[in-house]
Amino acid sequence: KVEMDKLPLKPWGSTVGACYTSNGDYDADARIIEPLIGGKLYSSSPVPPLPVPDLDSTLEKVKKSVLALAKNDEERENVIRDIENFKRDGGAALQRRLNKRASSLPSTSWLQLWWNTLGYLSVRDPVPVNVSYFFQFRSDPSCSTGIQRGASMLVASAIFRRMVMTGSLPPEVLGRRRVPLCQAAWKYMFNACRVPRKKQDEYTLHDPTLHRHVCVVRRGIFFRVPFVDADHNPLPLAVIESLLAQCVAVADCDGGELGPAVSLGAMSGDGRDEWAEAREMIRRVEGGREAMDVIETSALLLCLDPSTPVSDPCTASLCWYGQPTSPSRYFDKPLQLICADNGKAGLLGEHSMMDGMPVVRYADAVVSTSYDDARRAAPLTADGANGLAEERVAPVFGEGLVRRMREDEGLRGKDAESQARFASLVSSQSLSVSVYRAYGSSFMKSSKFSPDAYVQMAVQLASYRLFGENVGTYEASQVRTFKHGRTETTRSCGPESVAWCAEMGLRRDGGEADAEKRRRRVAMLRDAAKAHVGYLGMAGKGQGVDRHLFGLSMMVGKREAPPKLFSNPTFVKAKTWRISTSHLTHPKFDNWGWGEVVPDGVGVAYSIHPGRCVFNVTARKETGYSPKMAYLLEEALEEMRELLEAEALGSGTARSKL
């Protein structure tokens, strides 16, 4: 049942003004913005500060994970020496400094400002592929067109936005024990935008009471579309549908003077310094500043793509980056809803100030609201019928502005360069989707495995066979149980998984037929999965090693030599994430994914449903890794099942399939 709250939104007033600029500091932003956006949503869930792990404990975990990837005695001896010397080599002093920093920041995390800036806002790479992630939604059987799907998603978005802004959204909790989570991310979701600047980007938040519109884009043409009324409740579904139909009609006619003057999708998908220059050039054109403000202040972006994807790879690519040359996107918006003409839909998220789990909750509200639900939640009234006849949409960039932009030779050159670079970026990528239907979490649980740990071991075996060796593997773990916590790394490649992969071999050998070999392999698989679950639990408690090591490295003075461990080749290899993974399962998500994090690496997003597993595998096209990894994942899952079933039969514990 879709319900709307009745609390009013708070105008920001003269103290803050209509726009607030964030430089990536959660703590500073919280003091100013949280009383205005969300209110009790933030104060109702107190969480402890992010701990600084014990240095000896971190070094012991590092030794275990790094030694697993050492190739010979020399590498092992060198890295053991550097780990054992770390405290004497300046590490103890760095730990004292980090503890002092944490003590001096009682209202926030010692990590968050570094992570938000150095990990995101200061990075100069393009946002698409490198930062953005996508969700691919299951089809809504109650609608059949992109306009209908887009309209229903806007109704759901309006309801959810209102709950966020008024603070009536119930705070998130974790697990059966309902452990409170940090709610800091919500204020960056609606009426917000990343803004390109030289050296380091900013994030702007806009007074939602002043901006009741979304931006709709089709064929590169942007439209300002109202979607909520004066009380910030959704407009009737029929009104929104009519407005979207107008956008499509205008964009699909002969563009002429109304066509896009530049590709904002390609420009916003360019390198950050290049985009910063191009954006300023647009804003200097008469009327350009006002047009860009319409996009950046909008609640979100709705992309109505003139395409009809059918296959999962085609739909995933559409959600990930859009058209390969001139995409109808604005990659700096935190939320971009994607709708194809045939009703296929998804979401593209900008990652810099907001991790995936709050967006999953928003997306859950969107996909759980069908077209029929939206029609009941936002019915057409007499007033709405009058509005339907009166409302008209027009392109954000009007004829005069388009003409002036086209006459700007420098801007035309920037546009051509951005389009060429964007096309090169997209064409460098390979995306494969594997839907393995032989079994899923039901079989894994019946075999006494954590489904996530089981699939992580399949990833280990597949990557071992792909690369011919074990490599550094990252699984994202959230640490939102701590104040301003974001993520920690779970190192999936450890001594237990390395030993199991070596036992399984670089190719299938039919080992399930040999009773002794089979028992040994099953026991080693269980040991590896158990170790993974243990590390995952530690990471979730803020006791991983990678954020701690990053913090220690940040405490090295400008004129100081860092500890030798930080440059040890085996240590560096162990934290080079040639395999980047994350797990998200939602009954109404068909797929999800992001790009690889190193040039010679692979990104593996996965979902584990009761009867199937879905993998989205990305890599640079030149490596050939994406289709190979997708195949090897299926092969690993099949081999693991055969191994477990053969062992169950041999031990007399097999259950009937009936």
Image: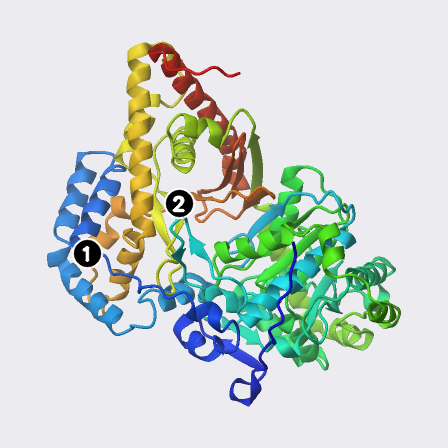
Q: Position of residue 515 (x, y in %)?
A: 32, 10
Residue 336 vs 344, above or below: the answer is below
Give residue 327's position: percent from left, percent from top.
Answer: 68, 56
Residue placed under numbered mark 2 in the picture:
475
Residue toward you, 230 or 154: 230
First of labels 1, 2 by sequence position: 1
The residue depicted at 57 percent of the width and 63 percent of the height is 334
Q: How is the image coloured?
A: rainbow
Above/below status of 588 relative to 642: below
Please give the residue where the numbered disc 1 appears in the rendered image: 54
- Residue ID at (37%, 61%): 485
Which of the image's four quarters has the N terminus? bottom right
Residue at the limit of the structure toward the bottom, as seen here? 14
User: Of residues 535 and 279, which is closer to you in this image?
Assistant: 535
Mark 1 neighbour class, 10 Å CA radius: few under 14, some 14 to 19, many 20 or more:
few
Q: Are marks 1 and 2 in contact (CB under 8 Å)?
A: no
Q: Amino acid at mark 2?
A: Glu
Question: Is any part of residue 249 visible from this angle?
Answer: yes
